[in-house]
Image: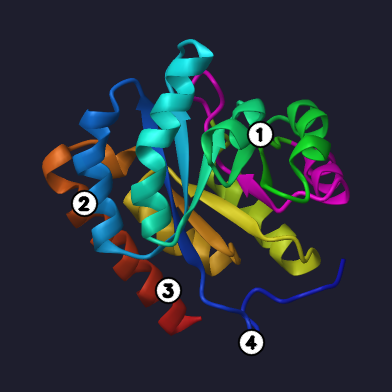
Amino acid sequence: MTSRQPNAPDRPAPRLTLVTPAVDDTRALGAALADALGAAEFAAVLLRLGPSDERTQINRIKAIAPAVQKAEAALLIDGLPELVAKSGADGAHLAGIDEFVEAVEHLKPNWIAGAGGLFTRHDAMLAAEKNADYVMFGEPNERGHRQPFDDILDRVSWWADVFQVPCVGYAAALDEVAPLAQAGADFIALGDFVFSDPARVAANVTAARQQLADADAVA
């Protein structure tokens, strides 16, 4: 892995990714997702699914995939790597180093394998060594808890200074977008705040896009 500086002149501007709420009803998500995809360009959409049987999960993924892929974004499934090939998704996001290591050889090289739930530096470095396409810092755990935001920024900055594997910073609120970008994240994942009010999805994405542009302007 080669060194890079987060504010180097040739560093590409960070891009947005989108994290959906847990989906039980794809029709309910469809309109909100269309609003979000129409308000900004996204590198990827991370689709979270509510619990159900395998056939239902596959049908949910297939219902969402066309809109995401038409927008030229990668569709990633949160967990469930065994459904990637069956559903037409572009890859999976694995939370926890054990889950990632178990799944990565089955996904690569045909599909994206992303690593999240990395709460130690050692786990993040191990994910990179195991050929993760990206590492994510700052996402909540299964109980909705996350590290203090200053610690997340420190982890992103450390990664950006040292490693070449792309880093995704998870923004749980709008005011976290610019600090994550300035810390050196390659991608900013927009969390549940985007979908907190169905009438404001496009406005929330537009505001995040503007924060990203403002952060890049002062980098």
Q: Comparing marks 2 and 3, which lies closer to the viewer?
A: 2
SS type, badge 3: helix
**x, y percentage for residue 94?**
66, 34
Crowd band around label 2 with a 10 angstrom C-alpha radius: few (<14), some (14–19), many (20+): some
Of the numbered discs 1 and 2, the one sitting upstream in the chain is: 2
Q: Which residue is mark 3?
A: 215
Q: Is residue 191 visible?
A: no
Sequence order check, earlier mark of 4 and 1 = 4
Residue 94 bears which disc, if any? Answer: 1
Nearest to the eye among marks 4 and 3: give it: 4
Q: Where are the magenta residues, as a range?
A: 120-145
Question: In terms of depth relative to the viewer, which is nearer, 207 or 17?
Answer: 17
Q: Is residue 122 magenta?
A: yes
The amino acid marked with disc number 3 is Ala
Earlier residue among tags 2 and 3: 2
| Residue at image location 37% in from the left, 39% down from the top | 64
State left or right for residue 181 relative to residue 21.
right
Label 4 or label 2, whichever comes before in sequence order: 4
Q: Nearer the viewer, mark 4 or mark 2?
A: 2
Whole-number angstrom distance, CA of label 2 to CA of label 3: 24 Å
